[in-house]
Image: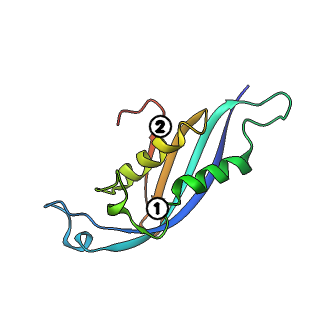
Amino acid sequence: MQFEIEKDFQFEAAHYFGHADANDLFKKIHGHSFRGTVTITGDAQEDKGWVRDLWKIETIIKDTIAPLDHALLNEVDGLEQPALEQIAGWIFERLAPQLPGLSCVEVGRPSCGERARVKLGAER
C-alpha cells in the first residue's frame, strides 16, 4: 500500500523583482511570511509502520531552508529571480537527495493567496 505523507514548513524572507516588466511595487524590497509543504510518497516500513520518520524529515527541511530564513532571497545562490516557482524548485533540488520518495514541494505566501508547487518528474 502506498502512502503520501506531508510536512509543513515556514520561513520569513524578503525579495524584489528586477526585471523590466515587474510591477513598480514589486521592484522594491519587500517581505513575506512563506509557508510550504513537502510531500513524500512511499510504502510504510513493515517494522515501523511509517513511510519515514516525520521528526527526521522536519530536521532535514529546517536545515535545508535555513539559508532562506530572514534572508534577502535575491542574494541566495540560485535565487537571483526569487519567484515562488523558483523558490519551490530550489528547495526541491536540495531536498531530493536527502529524502527518498520526495514527490512534491509547495511554497506559498498565504497573505497573498498565492502558491507554487513542483512535482517529481515536472519539467524545470
* SS at mark 1 in the image: loop
Residue 30 spot, x, y in % from top left: 34, 74
**How many numbered discs sit on the rendered protein?**
2
Q: Crowding near pointer 1: few (<14 within 10 Å), some, many (20+)? A: many
State the colouring used for the structure image.
rainbow
* SS at mark 2 in the image: strand
Residue designated by label 1: 68
For this view, does 39 lie left or right of residue 113? Answer: right
Q: As shown in the figure, which amino acid type bears the numbered disc 1?
A: Leu
Q: As shown in the figure, which amino acid type bears the numbered disc 2?
A: Lys
Could you say which quadrant of the image residue 51 lies in? top right
Residue designated by label 2: 119
In this view, 67 is above or below 102: below
Could you say which quadrant of the image residue 48 lies in? top right
Q: Crowding near pointer 2: few (<14 within 10 Å), some, many (20+)? A: some
In this view, 87 is above or below 52: below
Q: Residue at x 42, y 48 (%)?
A: 90
